[in-house]
Amino acid sequence: MKIPDSLGFISHIHKKETKITREETKATPVEGVRQPTDKSEKADITNVTEARNKPKTLGELRASGYRPLPIREEMRRNLISMIKAKKPIFNGIIGYDNTVIPQVENAVLSGQNIIFLGERGQAKSRVMRLLVGLLDEAIPIIRGCEINDNPFSPICKYCREKVASEGDKTEIVWLSREDRYGEKLATPDTTIADLIGDVDPIKVAEGRYLSDELTMHYGIIPRTNRGIFCINELPDLAERLQVGLFNLLEEADIQIIGYRVRLPLDIVLVASANPEDYTSRGRIITPLKDRFGAQIRTHYPVTIKDEIAIVEQEWQRFNDGDVSFYVPDYVKEVIAEITHLARNSSDIGQRSGVSVRVSIANLETVVANAIRRATVLGEKLAVPRISDLPYIVASTTGKVEMEGFEDKNEQKIIDDLTKKAVLIVFNRYFQFEELDPIVRQFNGGFNVETSDGMNAKSYVRYTKEIPGMAKAVKKMTDAETPEIVASAIEFILEGAHLNKRLNKTKVEGKTVYRH
């Protein structure tokens, strides 16, 4: 049986568009020169050709008619163009189509700086990085400039002197959109020199005066001039450093300590924060918060369908062995349901949230246990079962915070959540009366043993021994592969137990279902 591969990988955040011109496709092969043999080679040659055709000096740039736009206008223009063309703007972001993404688009159209506020694992950093897709493919800068100066209006002394001395012969290079993105994780050891800049002692040692602008060392913010700069976990930034961002957000310039110089930067500032951070680790000072144009709240997936879609997109797969794997839909639903229940559980702390990473790690864990079982038993297909679910304790406890006393049994809490999740998912598939033929077979002492270490073929006989079991399995799957049938049988038996139709006991590592 061919198992459907319904689990796709996330695509690259940015894909460079390449195209072959009509003249290139009709070009006559040159004798003695190897011609490109596939599309990727042709695309690479096209990129090189386009790069060679771009202006290389200030004079050529001026003659080409190129006119640079401020970054906010550039992003706004590109966003409008993408909306008109109905192109995806935030690839790989699921569940935000009607909530977060419209707010981000409004902020870009308004030319506002943005702060994303939300619990951990809500794709804040990914959304910030995807904003790069709203930038032009490349922009011109003066060769050797540390802060990406606009060639027509340089702001640093190096570029002003270069243009004054070389004029239209000033060399130009092209900066890609990916190189126009800067990011900093706010940490306690971050300094104003890291962000804004300071005196460069090496340049002073070379003989320059301290008052000379050329002795300045630029921080990461000015080096992201004409780009997007993001600060992750903004509340962790010391308050005195937050003050250093005032001018950037309001007057759009910075001042480097010790210099009578203001650099008018062209930057969009984006930040992220966790609501818990306002009280536990730090806070965003009010004047800084006031300077952000848009505060956008992120959220966890609202539906099980969105949770599953994110998990399928993100979880790690390995195709390096003899064992293939298949994950039934009901297993994915149970994994997602556990996380949703945890987000509303009084036994689990909700201050910092229950991340989608819980669902991702749990699916990886049950698949891993299924692969381990298949490897031990010599089976070629690994299919997660209900008996694999106890192993998610290891992948869950490190990602959630228990409420109450420290001696609270974490395993019991997770086990209770798992039982509730299985019951909810099972009752989506079966009506109560559909269990009657199966349950009747257990009258008179009949019992069934299951285990995460049992061979799949040992389950197949239950489809014949238990009236109604084959029909119930057929409702779950059309597959006749023993590994898939075994998983379905465990799910049906556990559902009957959780609906109080069968009893369950643990005996020497095995689970026994009886009436």
Image (cartoon, rainbow, N blue to C red):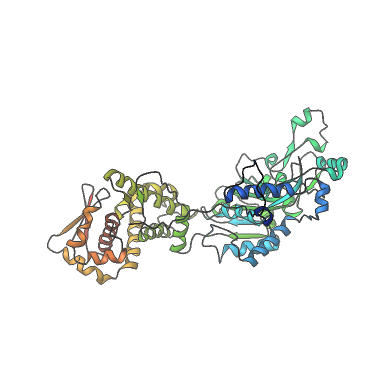
Q: How far across and down, in percent of the image, does residue 85 sit?
A: 63, 66
Q: Quadrant of residue 443?
A: bottom left
Q: Quadrant of residue 99?
A: bottom right
Residue 37 visible somewhere in the drawing: yes
Q: Quadrant of residue 440?
A: bottom left
| Residue placed most toward the observer, 198 or 229 | 229
| Residue placed most toward the observer, 175 or 243 | 175
Q: How far across and down, in percent of the image, does residue 454 sit?
A: 24, 49
Whether 513 is drawn above or below 178: the answer is below
Residue 410 visible somewhere in the drawing: no
Q: How far across and down, in percent of the image, does residue 102 sit?
A: 60, 65
Apparent side of residue 252 relative to residue 295 in the rendered image (left or right): right
Q: Residue furthest left?
A: 444
In which quadrant of the rendered image does the N terminus lie?
bottom left
| Residue placed most toward the observer, 290 or 20 | 20
Q: Residue at x 74, y 30 (%)?
A: 202
Q: Residue at x 81, y 38 (%)?
A: 213
Q: Residue at x 43, y 49 (%)?
A: 317
Q: How far across and down, in percent of the image, does residue 431 sit?
A: 29, 71
Q: Residue at x 60, y 54 (%)?
A: 130
Q: How many marks?
A: 0
| Residue placed most toward the observer, 63 or 182 | 63
In which quadrant of the rendered image does the C terminus lie?
bottom left
